[in-house]
Every structure is written in C-alpha cells, then in structure tokens.
Image (cartoon, rainbow, N blue to C red):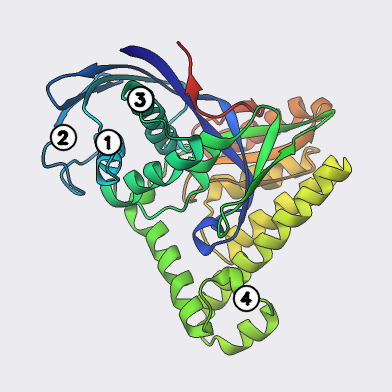
Amino acid sequence: MSGVWHAPGRVNLIGEHTDYNDGLVLPFALPQGITVAAARRADGVLDLESGGRHARVPLAGLVPGAVTGWAAYVAGVAGALLEAGHPVGGATLRFTSDLPAGSGLSSSAALECATAVALNDLYGLGLTAKELVPVAQRAENAYAGVPTGVLDQSASLLCEEGHALLLDVRSGLSSQIPLELGDYRVLVIDTHARHSLGDGQYAARRASCEEAARKLGVPSLRDVRNLAEALTRLKDPVLRRRVKHVVTENHRVEATVGLLRAGAVAEVGALLTASHLSLRDDYQVSWPEADAAVAVAANAGARGGRMVGGGFGGSVIVLAHRDALPAVREAVTARFTTTGWHPPTYLEATAAPGAHRLS
C-alpha cells in the first residue's frame, strides 16, 4: 500500500501564546505545506528523506530522545502512535515542501501531520483528524523537545477551506468561522529572520505562565477573570507582563470572531496591531524586522498587522485592502533594503483545507 498525502502550514490570524494557557486561538490553513509520498515497509524501519537529508530510524526501541534533528518530528509521530497501542510498522517516507522552515508558518507541525495522516492510512488505523492532534503534539513535545501547545497541529489537521478554526484549547471544542474577506487580503511577510523554538526562549515563556498561574492559585491563565486584581497580586514585573498578554489576547480572539461574523473585516486590523504590540511589549517575543514591517505597512495603508508564530523570527501578517497591497509591499521592501536586512518575501494567504490524502 502506498500513496501521497499533504499537510498544510498555517497562519494564526490571532491568539498567540494562548494555546498552552488553555485559551482561544483562531488559525487557518495555508495551501502551502508539506507533501509526503509514503509506502509500507516490512523491516520495522522508517526510511526518511527530505531535501537531500536522509535518516533511518528503527522502530524497535524508539523512545523520546533517541532521534535528533528534523527526523525527530517524523519518528516522534510513529513513537506516539506506538505508545498509544496502534500497530504501526516501518515506512518509506519522502517529503517535499513549499513552506519555508523557520518562517513562523508551522513547518514542523505540517511535517508531523503529514506523517500522521500517512501512517494512519498506510496501516488502516482508522483515527480521526481530531484523534491525530495529540499524536502530533506528543511528537513535538516529547520527541522533538519543543513544549508547544496544540494550535499548530489542530490547524494543520482540522481546518476547512475558506474558514478559520476557532479552537477552545481547554474544552477541545472548535467551530469553523467563515473567513470572508471581501476586498481585503491577508498578506504574509516572511522577514527571513530565522527562528528556532528549540532554543529555550519558547519554553521559558511557557514556564513563566505556569509560574504566574501557580502564584495566582488558578489552573491556568485562562482562569484569570479580573486582570487588574491579578496584576496587583503579582510582584514580579515579568510575570505581570506575561499575564497581561495572555488575558487580553483571549479577549482579542473573541472580538475578532465577532467582527468576522458581523462582516466588519476592516476593523480586525486594529486588533491585529494590538496583538502585535502586546507580543512585543508584554510577551517580549517580537524582533526588529517584525516591528518595522508592521509599522511601515500601517503607514503605507494597511489596516493592521502582527507577528505570527512563536516569535524571535519568522513572519508577519498584514490585513490590507487589495488596492493597498502594492504600496505595502513597496514600502516594506524599501525599509528592509535601507536597513540592510534580507529582502522580505510575500504571500497572499488564503484559507485551505487541512491534512488529506492526495492520491
């Protein structure tokens, strides 16, 4: 048995660093992602190839930490399935990608989810897309060593074409929100400042949120009901900033959904910018190219914008009327050129379906 499967990258419209705080997120899937041609093997080995990189991983004795580098994301999916008692065997997996790694568009989650849907079908496991989400997350957390929440894997597996996914991480409930932008467009600006969530900064942010929740006596920051009271109780200025971002970001997700449902697309721009300022000042995960792109785009006529992804590098999204896009691109490119940064690249994002079999 063999075939070809595809899993998309994602743009998180709003709701950043809220997923591991039991909060709300609003991503949508991109047409771009990772495609895998896969076939079963009888020798209990994962034979992997991606962009000229090769790896062979025996399934026997596969445990977290046994595989490093990019192959850990793939092997981790098989490991998580085996841990859960699913009869997965060896496979030949050949990956191709049109999603830039390190751009903040969840290439790692796409890699995991492409592997998950391929192994699910190859071995007739019968798992639903929702059931594959924790499998892919386990691969990233335990095997790749990155303590992410479920945002990226949920987006890659559960999104529907033309919709954003409103996900309540605590309850697991989700709904499809029509992403009807009319004359507006979501422009992804890849700043080419590369990031890695495995460098400890992401884990540090998560740990600070957990510490703040303990000090406040709540299960997670999702449970903070009175922000002013919480900020008064916390003495550590860093923890105060982290809490402020998470609580206000959840409110911004709810407000964005309301505006989309009301057809007030242009007004979403202000919420995107507010999210960026919070990520820059309170969560402290932005970077110079992102700050410049958001500010310059606004001056060139965009309605708003923000950094996306874990931070410290990657991409920015901008909401702009289609007629303003040329001016936005020109202004941002000029700023990057005069500053001596790598030229940015652009992608008009459209909402695509989640992971699926191609052939």
Of badges 4 and 2, the one in the foreground is 2
Of badges 3 and 1, the one in the foreground is 3
Residue that label 1 marks:
78
Identity, as a three-letter code, of the amino acid under mark 4: Val
Residue that label 2 marks:
59
| 4 and 1 marks in contact (CB < 8 Å) | no
354 left or right, relative to 330 = left
Front residue of 324/205: it is 205
Residue 191 is at least partly visible in this image: no
How packed is label 1: few (under 14 Cα within 10 Å), some, or many (20 or more)? many
- Residue 203 rendering spot, x and y as whole percentages: 38, 60
Identity, as a three-letter code, of the amino acid under mark 1: Ala
Q: State the separation of the CA atoms marked 1 and 2.
A: 8 Å
Q: State the separation of the CA atoms marked 3 and 1.
A: 14 Å
Which labelled disc corresponds to residue 224? 4
Whichever of labels 3 and 4 marks the residue nearer the N terminus, that label is 3
How packed is label 3: few (under 14 Cα within 10 Å), some, or many (20 or more)? few
Residue that label 3 marks:
124
Q: State the separation of the CA atoms marked 4 and 2.
A: 43 Å
